[in-house]
Amino acid sequence: MGRLGWMEILVIVVLLVILFGHKSIPGMMKNLADGVNVFKREMRDSAKKDDKNDKSHVKKTTAKTKTYKKVNNKKQK
């Protein structure tokens, strides 16, 4: 399979117009664009949540480590 040339793309566009009609294609493209935008937004939100979870995990671990060191220092004395 090679690259699509302008002739193949033209045939695909004509077939799409024949199958779906010229009025429904913009609506389908808008729905597709909305879906992509929602997907991107969810990926950003997920990345922010992951960053917050990673930072809170580091803080909790640090707090536990400090407490552990204090307890061990008291036992050694």
Image: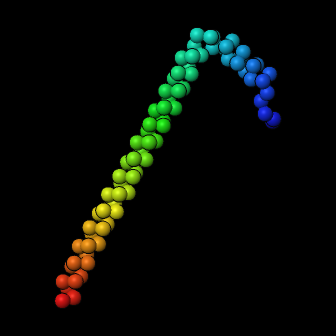
Q: Total of numbered circles in the picture?
A: 0
Which residue is pictured at 80% across the width and 22% down the height? 7
| Residue 11, placed above or below residue 35 | above
Q: Residue at x 54, y 17 (%)?
A: 27
Q: In this view, does 77 lie above or below 24?
A: below
Name the residue at the bottom extreme. Answer: 77
**Picture coordinates of residue 70, whole percent (x, y):** 22, 78
Quarter of image, res 29:
top right
Looking at the image, residue 37 sits to the left or right of residue 50; the answer is right
Residue 53 x %, y %? 35, 54
> Residue sitting at 81 percent across and 36 percent down?
1
5 to the left or right of 27: right
Colour basis: rainbow
Query: Is 31 rendered above or below residue 53?
Result: above
Q: Give the residue at x 34% y 63%.
A: 58
Quadrant assignment for the C terminus: bottom left
Question: Is 52 located above or below residue 12 in the figure?
Answer: below
Q: Where is residue 3 in the image (x, y as percent from the top left)?
A: 78, 33
Residue 71 is left or right of residue 1, and the answer is left
